[in-house]
Amino acid sequence: MAEQEPGWELYRSFLAVMREGSLSGAARMLGMTQPSLGRHIRELEETLGVSLFARSPQGLSPTDLAHALLPHAQTMASASMALRRTATTRHDAMSGVVRIAASEVMGVEVLPPMLAAFRERHPGVVIELSLSNQVENLLRRDADIAIRMGRPAQEALVARRVGSIVLGLYAHKRYVKAHGRPHTLADLVSHALIGFDHETPYIRAMRPAGMPYTREHFALRTDNDLAALAALRAGYGIGFCQCGIAQRDPALLRLLGDRFQLSMETWVVMHEDLRRHALMRALYDHLATALIEYAAMAPSPAKPRRATPKDALI
């Protein structure tokens, strides 16, 4: 007799509890009652013959096994979403759902007008925008199209290099009026620098250029790129910004442009199986063309130093 296989709805409930941290939160997220969701968890445990949560008056605590199962449940969820997107998008249709993965700054500051222009021409498209500085797994179909800073290494992906996005040092004109401009890289130590809370390969890549840009020099430390950009615009201090973003705001002043800048190689990527989908291919080509134009906007008075920031997608 074949062993009973848990249905996807049980794993979906398990994943919701892991994400929300409670039965009540998971029930709200899924639009279920708490008793129904609790039955799903018990049924999953009984079917698998394991204990996934420790019960206490304070609620549920995931066991080590639950944490071990989590990435597999996430893979199932990605496959389920990809299946629905594929089912709603005919190969020859210019309507359907497309999921795009990008960094937070790209998704908030750069992509919206590009996506708006595409939807004006193709009103049947629905965009799911997944913003994270973590690299989405396109082979697992966590997303259909991704904007990546760095050449993808995986096979079975279609990738187009759209150029190098240039970053420079900027400050708001209010800050410059109050504190003056740095004239050399060494002058930066006397200014309020906006930087990261945790050291990354991105920060270490800047050190050989002679920049005093390590954690102990920062007057504001954050791992959230949008928060850093907001602080820059508020006049908090000096920080990095994509030149294409800064050029839209006349209040942001380029500093030490003849001394230092970073260049991030940028790619548009999708799974090769999606080339047969008219909508996917059209959006892929549209983003590639628009990002080529965006990357070409930045001035380049200094010879760019190429960073290798796998985990810092500014």
Image (tube, rainbow, N blue to C red):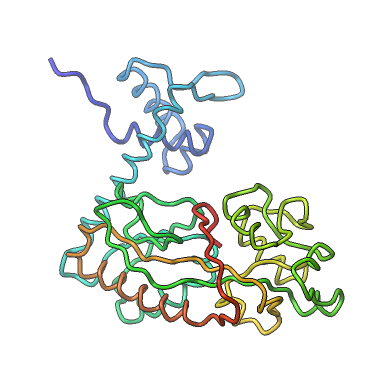
Instruction: Name the image quarter holding residue 170.
Output: bottom right
Is residue 117 positioned above or below 80 on the image? below
Residue at the left extreme? 1
Residue at the right extreme? 178
> Which percent across, then down, holds residue 76?
31, 39
Residue located at (44% from left, 38% from top): 16
Number of numbered tags placed on the structure image:
0
Instruction: Name the image quarter holding residue 88.
Output: bottom left
Is residue 186 positioned above or below 298 on the image? above
Residue located at (35% from left, 59% from top): 99
* Residue 112 appears left or right of 98: right
* Residue 155 appears left or right of 42: left
> Which percent across, then down, holds residue 288?
36, 73
- Residue placed most toward the observer, 122 or 305: 305
Residue located at (71% from left, 69% from top): 232
- Residue placed most toward the observer, 222 or 302: 302
- Residue placed most toward the observer, 57 or 269: 269
Instruction: Name the image quarter holding residue 240.
Output: bottom right
* Residue 244 appears left or right of 12: right
Residue located at (65% from left, 47% from top): 198
> Which percent across, then down, holds residue 14?
41, 32
Is residue 260 positioned above or below 251 on the image? above
Where, quadrant-wise, is the N terminus in this rendering? top left
> Which percent across, then down, holds residue 197?
68, 49
Is residue 18 positioned above or below 106 on the image? above
Where, quadrant-wise, is the C terminus in this rendering? bottom right
